[in-house]
Image: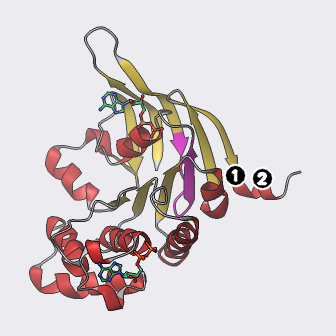
Amino acid sequence: INIKDVSTVFPSADNPFVAVDNVSLEIPRGSIQGIIGFSGAGKSTLLRNINLLERPTSGQIIVDGTDLTALNDEELRRARHHIGMIFQHFNLLNNRNAVENVELSLKFAGVPKKDRRRRALEALAIVDLADKTTAYPGQLSGGQKQRVAIARALATEPKVLLCDEPTSAVDPRTTASVLQYLSDINAQLGITTVIVTHEMNVVKAIADNVAVMEDGAVVEQFDIASLKNPA
Ligand code: ADP
Ligand code: ADP
């Protein structure tokens, strides 16, 4: 992922707000990138810039060699099938059970109906939810709900996984479990992973590289190895 000179300005009659201020960031293929900073720093907006959920006002987003900002709507729709996303509050549909939630993302990705059930069950097995496939979100713990959301993101076989405060709504023990799943998936499937968080312990546990955001700008970058083995 190559984020080049990206700015995102939210319009307002008297005082336009610069949420992302000329950010450039290169995220190596297969790595886990942490983006850390206080609330309001622009982390979530930058993450949403990567899949153009929030289109940057200027700059380029290059994923796997393709500049997403240059694509037309149909091309962008296809490119997004290779970018999974998970959220703080899971964003599951409460009136659909676990396997149906996952199948729905496969439907949107254009996967034929005959293949959806099998692929959804495979994705749920990766996050050890083979015994919860018919449970509704209201019957699952916070950690289990996030694992369904991870399965939903994985089912379309993404190259990139975007995680917006993935552990902020769960307790510390569940946080460790969710991070372990994300880390294992990164190691086994090689999915380039970006995690936005305000918690330093989260990036320390899982990230290869960290960018620190403040007032819309990346003010510092470091790799976790250097933090663990200071020169
Ligand atoms: P973070 O994820 O670091 O908490 P956000 O990216 O959510 O920060 O927000 C950065 C700033 O941009 C905040 O001040 C927020 O209020 C503002 N902002 C976010 N989305 C919008 C929007 N759609 N319209 C106007 N301002 C926004
Ligand atoms: P946590 O404390 O980690 O949030 P919960 O206490 O919510 O976990 O859930 C513990 C276990 O009970 C989980 O395996 C979950 O699937 C099951 N469970 C929770 N709520 C319900 C429910 N309403 N119906 C059936 N099973 C449930």
* Residue closer to the observer: 19 or 78: 19
Where residue 178 appears, as percent x and y from the top left, is 50, 70
The correct choice, above or below, for 91 with respect to 120 in the image is above
Instruction: Assess whether mark 1 and mark 2 are in contact (beta carbons under 8 angstroms).
Output: yes
Please name the residue shown 30% across and 8% down the image: 14
Q: Residue 159: within the magenta?
A: no
In which of the image's four quarters is ligand 1 placed? top left
Please name the residue shown 63% across and 52% down the image: 209
Mark 1: give few (<14), some (14-19) or many (20+) Cα within 10 Å.
Answer: some
Q: Which residue is mark 1?
A: 223
Instruction: Return the residue found at the far left.
Output: 113
Disc 2 on helix, strand or loop? helix
The correct choice, above or below, for 123 with respect to 146 in the image is below
Any mark on residue 227, and which?
2
Disc 1 on helix, strand or loop? strand
| Magenta span of residues | 25-36
